[in-house]
Image (spheres, helix red, strand yellow):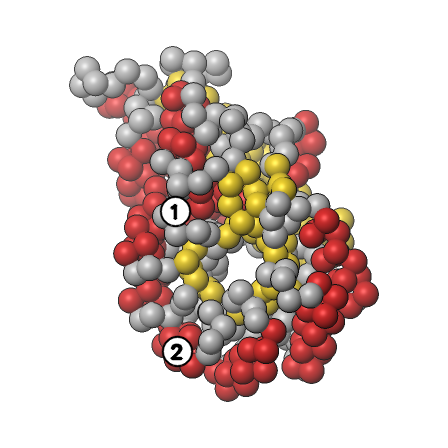
Amino acid sequence: MSTPETTAHAAQQAGEATLDRISWIKLSSVTLPLATPISDAKVFTGRQKPMTEVAFLFVELATEGGHQGIGFSYSKRAGGPGQFAHAKEIAPTLLGEDPSDIAKLWTKLVWAGASVGRSGLSTQAVAAFDIALWDLKAKRAGLPLAKLLGAHRDSVRCYNTSGGFLHTPTEQLLENASRSVAEGIGGIKLKVGHPDGKVDLSRVTAVREHLGDEVPLMVDANQQWDRPTAQRMGRALEEFGLVWIEEPLDAYDARGHAALAASLDTPVATGEMLASVAEHWELIRNDAADIIQPDAPRIGGITQFLKLATLAEHHHLQLAPHFAMEIHLHLAAAYPYEPWVEHFDWLEPLFNERLQISGGRMHVSSRPGLGITLSEQARAWTQADYELGTRP
């Protein structure tokens, strides 16, 4: 059985092009409490309980040359301890490796845990390492990650989700929407999928009338409609001029999404719950979405996201990454077609920095890498940590 020492020794056999090596790794399991329990359609249909916290896996890396990187993955309702446990198992394989060889290291990490597969919890654990490696590379270059990747723009259209959950009373919905627009956010997304479709239509009508026709509006059913209901609700929602209808069907129903997308004028968006590039390819090859919504921490990190973005671009799809705006702002800025990024303020207590939003857009900062550092509050919310190698 290999040890960190033997793994590092094997990595020392690299050629003269290797200028630096990973010397220290720290993993942290952090639980972020939510101020208010969150309910979407999955709660109203009895499939899940309200969400009260989000579990994060943070990976911090350092090299012999003094460079550092940070990355994270996350899990909602369940899976956080599992991600942390898997990360502990595979972390030693990185010691002594060249941090520049990110694609090679992604493959090495996946093979270190090959028996648990190449999607789901295992690659979500790998994602935190991968994102930290990209952050390190951009910091070493002195560039924001978007600029390292090659940005098409320095700001991205953004929309707010956190004010539009199904548990929120309609009057509060209107207040939340007005506040978001006043703060410079460009679009508003509402949760739908209530067991009574009339409730959905009433809430969407109220927000559209309150905001007017000029503010971009999206809805998200969180996979809770069957095919007939999605068709009926999709037709009823056409009059509101929505930017998209999100997750109208089960995330793996590519054929159902394709039929729906072909029958509606309103674009169909989906993909956030998928956990690999291969799963997204099923959507793409079946023309199942007008807008693809990958989540870098869920599909294995930035390395995999870039592969998926190439496929999406080739098929002329729009892009609207899910959650984790601290990561996805950079990836969306590097996508050729004008994308959207999702604004959630939930994660702000975890970081010392804030993203700038104005004029309906989220702006890439001049800070190198992802441009984030962990706050003292994040340290205080740490449930467990694991450290190996030589601390810088």
Q: Residue at x 53, y 69 (%)?
A: 245
Picture quarter containing residue 201? bottom right
Taking depth in this image into account, of 199 and 61 the one nearest to the observer is 199
Along the horizontal axis of the image, is 183 left or right of 109?
Answer: right
Residue at 66%, 46% (x, y): give it. Answer: 184
Dot 2: element: helix
- Give the quarter of the image for residue 217: bottom right
Check the image and report above or below for 193 versus 24.
below
Image position of 261 with respect to 373: above or below:
below
Which of the numbered marks, if any, corresponds to residue 335?
1
Residue 22 numbered mark, or none: none
Name the amino acid, label 1. Answer: Tyr
C-alpha distance separating marks 2 and 1: 25 Å
Give the mark nearer the N terminus: 2 vs 1.
2
User: Which percent across, then down, holds residue 232?
Assistant: 54, 85
- Please identify the residue farthest to the right as the structure is shown: 171
**Callout 2 amino acid:** Ala
- For label 2, the crowd category at 10 Å Cα-Cα, with few meaning under 14, some 14 to 19 and many 20 or more, is some
Disc 1, SS:
loop
Q: Are marks 2 and 1 in contact (CB under 8 Å)?
A: no
Residue 212 versus residue 371 in the image, above or below = below
Q: Position of residue 363 (x, y in %)?
A: 55, 38
Q: Residue at x 48, y 25 (%)?
A: 368
Residue 175 in the image: state x and y as whole percent. Answer: 79, 58
| Position in image of residue 220 (x %, y %) | 58, 67
Give the camera-side residue of 106 and 154.
154
Q: Nearer the viewer, residue 332 or 134?
A: 332
Residue labelled with disc 2: 262
Residue 69 seen in this snapshot: no
Q: Residue placed at 69% from the left, 31% from the top?
A: 377
For the residue carrying disc 1, how many other residues have a C-alpha within 10 Å: few (<14), some (14-19), or many (20+)?
many
Q: Quadrant of the N terminus?
A: top left
